[in-house]
Amino acid sequence: MEILRKIDLFQKEINALRPLEGEMLGQIKDYYRIGLTWTSNALEGNSLTESETKVLLEDGLTVGGKPLRDVFEAVDHAKAYDFMFSLFQTRRIDEWAVLKMHELFYQNIEPGYAGRYRDVRVLITGSQYPVAAPGKVQDEMDRLFGWVQKEREGYHPVEFAAQLHKRFVFIHPFKDGNGRVARLLMNLALIQDGYLPAIVPPILRRDYVSLLERAHRDDGEFIEFIAEREFESQKEILRLFQIPFPSEGQGMNPSQTLQ
């Protein structure tokens, strides 16, 4: 896949910034905390703007006239994001991590379902494909974590992150909040392997949703879509650090990790 080749080329330049730690790591974490919280919530219909999200998270100031749920979604998504980043130097992607992320995000929205798999049936609006029945959710999630442990190293890290996102969403283990946890989970996989978080902007929501639906039959375009989001993150960070974009003639090195 051509986009993965480009990502590996840009990753070589990002790896030259290693080790990402201390103040630099803090800057990157804070930079994506606002963007990922705003975009992930906006994809699901949250009414807060990016600037309103920034003021809420950085200054603790709420915006008049906004639904309380929208405020909780922003504040608690940021908490789940912080937890995600706490797993940065591990290879941990397991049930505990997934349930904790959902608990942090959903704790003020519907406490009885925060951090636990659903026991009710759900339908995905606009999708012709069923998700796991309540009695099958645990088995499907166990299979997912087994796949992570056995198959992770066989994928390019960006492809693995996209696959993890897709497989999680197809199970839809929670009553609500599945999309946001899926994107956190995808980005957990990326940062653990030394890559930047991938952000799906709200303007691309239609493409994102349609490619996820199509991924039931063929996931190639969805994986390429996620790879494009990663590539955009790479370009943005190199621009912010004022590092020239690599040229095609620089060659390719295997991707390295942050660790």
Image (cartoon, grey):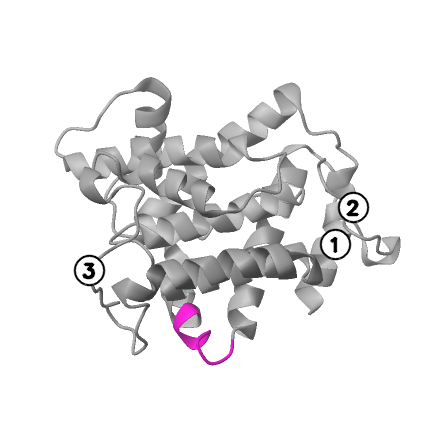
Q: Nearer the viewer, residue 212 or 16?
A: 212
Residue drawn at x 68%, y 59% as measured from the top left: 156
Q: Nearer the viewer, residue 52 or 193?
A: 193
SS assignment at label 3? loop
Q: Quadrant of residue 119?
A: bottom left
Residue assigned mark 3: 120
Badge 3: residue crowd in 10 Å (few <14, some 14–19, many ≥20):
few
For the residues labelled 3 and 1, say whether their Cβ atoms are less than 8 Å apart: no
Could you tell which of marks 3 and 1 lies nearer the N-terminus? 1
Say the numbered circle drawn on residue 8: 1
Residue assigned mark 2: 12
User: Which amino acid does the dot numbered 1 rest on?
Assistant: Asp
User: Which amino acid does the dot numbered 2 rest on?
Assistant: Lys
Q: Nearer the viewer, residue 144 or 139?
A: 139
Q: Position of residue 254 (x, y in %)?
A: 81, 53
Residue drawn at x 60%, y 59% as measured from the top left: 160
Q: CA distance from mark 1 to mark 2?
A: 6 Å
Q: Quadrant of residue 242?
A: top right
Q: Which residues are magenta?
A: 212-218
SS assignment at label 1? helix
Q: CA distance from mark 2 to mark 3?
A: 46 Å
- In the image, 175: left or right of 220? left
Q: Nearer the viewer, residue 116 or 7?
A: 116
Q: Nearer the viewer, mark 3 or mark 1?
A: 3
Q: Nearer the viewer, mark 2 or mark 3?
A: 3
Q: Is residue 54 visible?
A: yes
Decide: is 7 above or below 15. Answer: below
For the residues labelled 1 and 2, say whether their Cβ atoms are less than 8 Å apart: yes
